[in-house]
Image (cartoon, rainbow, N blue to C red):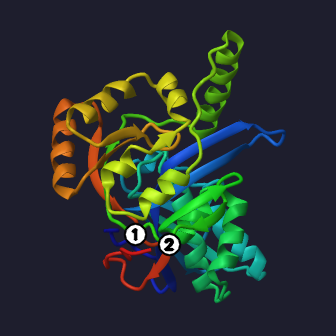
Amino acid sequence: MPRDVSTPAGARAVTAVAPAKINLHLGVGDLRADGFHDLLTVYRAVDLWEQVTVALVDDDDPDVVVVSGPGAAQVPTDRTNLAAKAVDLLRGEAGSGARLAIRIVKGVPVAGGMAGGSADAAAALVATDRLLGLGLGRAALEERAARLGSDVPFCIRGGTALGTGRGETLAPLLHARAEQHVVVAIADGGLSTPVVFAELDRLRAERSETGRDLPRSGGVEALVEALAGQDPARVAGLLANDLEPAALSLMPALRKTLRAGAEAGALHGMVSGSGPTCLFFCADREQAIAVAAEVSETGVAREVRLTHGPVGGAHVIDNPQQTPQKTP
């Protein structure tokens, strides 16, 4: 549950939260002329949260970005921060000269392939919309979110969704409601998403020259069908991530982490998005607890957490101590 954050004395403030994402399927196309890749992905929001407070401050006070929580030192606090970009976007749209302070409490692994920065942007959009009284609906917020990053619209929406384009075009999978329990193994260090994509391009080109093309995940029809049911083993057998070979190439130690999860009895283990966080999918909470304990004992990960999904998307919380919404 997000922790409380202080706001300037006498300031009006709005606090919002947004969830982490995992990719149950991440198919990556070839590099496009615009520098992006076409993606085919199945997103799922899980119960790890970013908390963002946007506060009105006095005109002579500076705009500030303050970050706390695990990995806070790795997060930029200038206007390149995605939450700051989100605030600046809506402030400019409103024609407002208001001074706005941003306070972020991290709950999602930093540079871990779980969209922590995108969740910050999503929460900041929702909070700023409420604070400035813009009254934007969910669709309008998602459109603005797409300008900030490929994963930001999904962090607004939450639940489970099919993503295409750069991942920003979403189709909700409303039938995919069965609870899924996941062990999150957080690596010591991070991976840059652009660097991982570049490594994938390099590996594909290298393999193509030798006639041994890198395997690619196929369609998502079988996974989407499985998500409508209640069989976690069937779902686990259909999970895929085209970025995993690139993440393993850049950080070979992750192979030990994946092996530890397999030996602990997880239904399936894989790198989360661009990594280096690893995910282990389990049959139920009891198995997840057991897998988490065994993986933790091996020392292959800096931190091991339990989570589950699907959960809802970004939303305002009236009390920063309250539990975020659990349903999509």
Please tell me whether residue 113 is drawn above or below residue 126 in the rendered image. Answer: above
Say what amino acid the circle numbered 2 marks: Leu
Q: Which residue is mark 1?
A: 177
Residue at 47 percent across and 87 percent down: it is 10
Q: Residue 96's image quarter?
A: bottom right
Task: Report the disc number at residue 192.
Answer: none
Q: Position of residue 244 (x, y in %)?
A: 50, 33
Residue at 16 percent across and 35 percent down: it is 297
Say what amino acid the circle numbered 1 marks: Arg
Task: Report the disc number at residue 174.
Answer: 2
Residue at 32 percent across and 54 percent down: it is 232
Between marks 1 and 2, how big is the CA–CA gap? 7 Å
Q: Seen from this angle, which residue lies furthest right? A: 33
Question: Does residue 67 appear anywhere in the picture?
Answer: no
In this image, 30 relative to 318: left or right?
right
Residue at 32 percent across and 79 percent down: it is 322
Q: Quadrant of the C terminus?
A: bottom left
In this image, 267 relative to 101: left or right?
left
